[in-house]
Amino acid sequence: MKLYQKILLAVDLHPKCDNAAVKKALAIAEETGASLHLIHVIEHIPAYSLGQAYPSIIDLEEEILKEATKELGKLAHKHHIPADKQIIVMGSPKAAIISKAEELKIDLIILGSHGRHGIALLLGSTASSVLSHAPCDVLAVRIKE
């Protein structure tokens, strides 16, 4: 029996942030023979943050989605991850990662963790929320600032 069959790697598409998590995910996938899925979650832009420019929120989100699709495609191509394993969704990162993990019957979620301190620690983070609510194992890879 394989240790892991399906891995979901959550990426934020900032190369410096995710290199450690990407390397770890690729190594585990290779070692276990698991399929590797990439997920990037784009948070909705609150209407009040743009003031009077509300109609442009949709255009801005579409532009962000287009750019994220391009960047995720580059990352996937670099590591030979097929298009059907690339996922981009809009919404809450915590909820989207957990939802996709359940939908795809993921065995392991891998994501980067900044090791928050102070107020960010009190408010929680994506990594801690995913760890608390995930339907599977979670590996939080420390991101060196």
Image: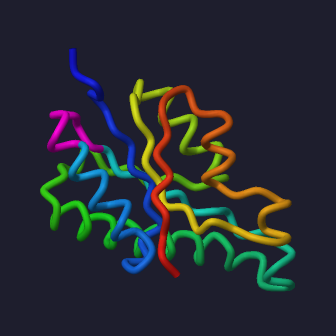
Q: Residue at x 52, y 81 (%)?
A: 145
Q: Residue at x 32, y 51 (%)?
A: 86
Vertical placement of residue 119 versus 127, above or below:
below
Q: Residue at x 67, y 52 (%)?
A: 92
Quarter of the image with the N terminus is: top left
Furthest residue in direction top, as rendered: 1
Q: Is residue 139 left or right of residue 122?
A: left
Vertical placement of residue 29 versus 62, above or below:
above
Residue 4 appears in which quarter of the rendering?
top left
Q: Is residue 70 left or right of residue 117?
A: left
Q: Residue at x 79, y 83 (%)?
A: 50
Q: Is residue 31 magenta?
A: yes
Q: How has the structure been colored for display? A: rainbow
Q: Is residue 94 left or right of residue 16?
A: right
Percent coordinates x, y for residue 36 in the rendering: 27, 43
Q: Is residue 113 magenta?
A: no
Vertical placement of residue 54 versus 38, above or below:
below
Q: Which residues are magenta?
A: 29-36
Percent coordinates x, y for residue 74 in the rendering: 23, 70
**Mark count:** 0
Percent coordinates x, y for residue 115 in the rendering: 63, 65
